[in-house]
Amino acid sequence: MTQVPGGPPPAGWYPDPTPPQSGGPPLLRWWDGTRWTAHVETVPGAVPAWAGPAPARPQGPTTPDGQPLAGWWQRVAASVLDSLILGLPANLLTLPWQLRMQLDLQDLVDEPLSADEFLDGLVGILQSNLPAFLVPSLLGLAYMGVLLRWKGATVGKMALGIAVRLREQPGQLPWSAIAIRLIVYPALTTVLMLIALFSGSLALGLTLLLVALLLSWADVLLPLVDPKRQAIHDKLAGTNVVRTRR
């Protein structure tokens, strides 16, 4: 690309040295201090190349190469939409276990039991109906894994105009990052809950369930306060959720 006389300027938004397409508006391209990146912004009336930084850069945090990060509510709304999309097939596939679990729970409530007996019965019902929880999890892994690799975003994220990418560089997500986002961190809470169900100790089981719940909520809420807007699984995978449109 075009080299700057006298040395490269600092990182920032500059008029794109690549001529715009016929009839297209002038563009600004992010210069990371050493090279041009793939991120551009449409700015009517852009000044000649290298006349100085663009006057209007998008506000808010970005990736190191200048792509704006998604907001917390965008991430939440996308997750809710994905849950609705997955809800129908997951419920259809697990309907037999759901019906049996409801009948077992009704029988448990109708019996005159002590608190300990009730909790023991509840754990037994959950253990015998594990497919009701495992099938939706496996379906979600397949749905998110394929779409993140193919499009960089689930249907919910695409609808909200956001996507997942490596923080340090754009491009297709590697399977390793997808696996960490979808399996490694969630597996920790899943293992804790399974140990809680099969531990045989009520105190240990409740403690592990509480820890799993706190970890899940910490993962959801961390982007609200993190300057890089990363959840725990983002930090482990080295990813960011970014905006793909204004």
Image: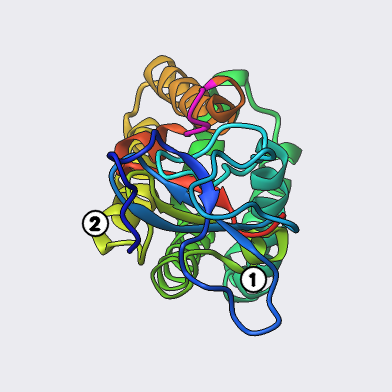
| Residue ranking furthest to the left | 176
Q: Nearer the viewer, residue 55 or 212?
A: 55
Place of residue 218 in the rendered image (x, y in percent of width and height, measured from the top left): 51, 24
Question: Which residue is denoted by mark 2 in the rendering?
Answer: 176
Tell me: 233 left or right of 62. left
Residue at 33% of width from left, 37% of height from top?
A: 188
Which segment is the magenta one? 226-230
From the image, state whether disc 1 or disc 2 is nearer to you. Answer: 2
In the rendering, at what x and y percent does residue 100 appear? 62, 62
Quick one: 171 or 157, which is closer to the camera?
Answer: 171
Amino acid type of disc 2? Ser
Q: Quadrant of the N terminus?
A: bottom left
Residue at which label 1 appears? 95
In this view, 224 is above or below 59: above
Counting residues from the N terminus, which is met first, the one under dot 1 or under dot 2? 1
Residue beneath the point at 41% across and 47% down: 31
**Distance from label 1 to label 2 (Cα)?**
33 Å
Q: Residue 85 or 92: which is nearer the viewer?
A: 85
Say if residue 44 shows up in the picture.
Answer: yes
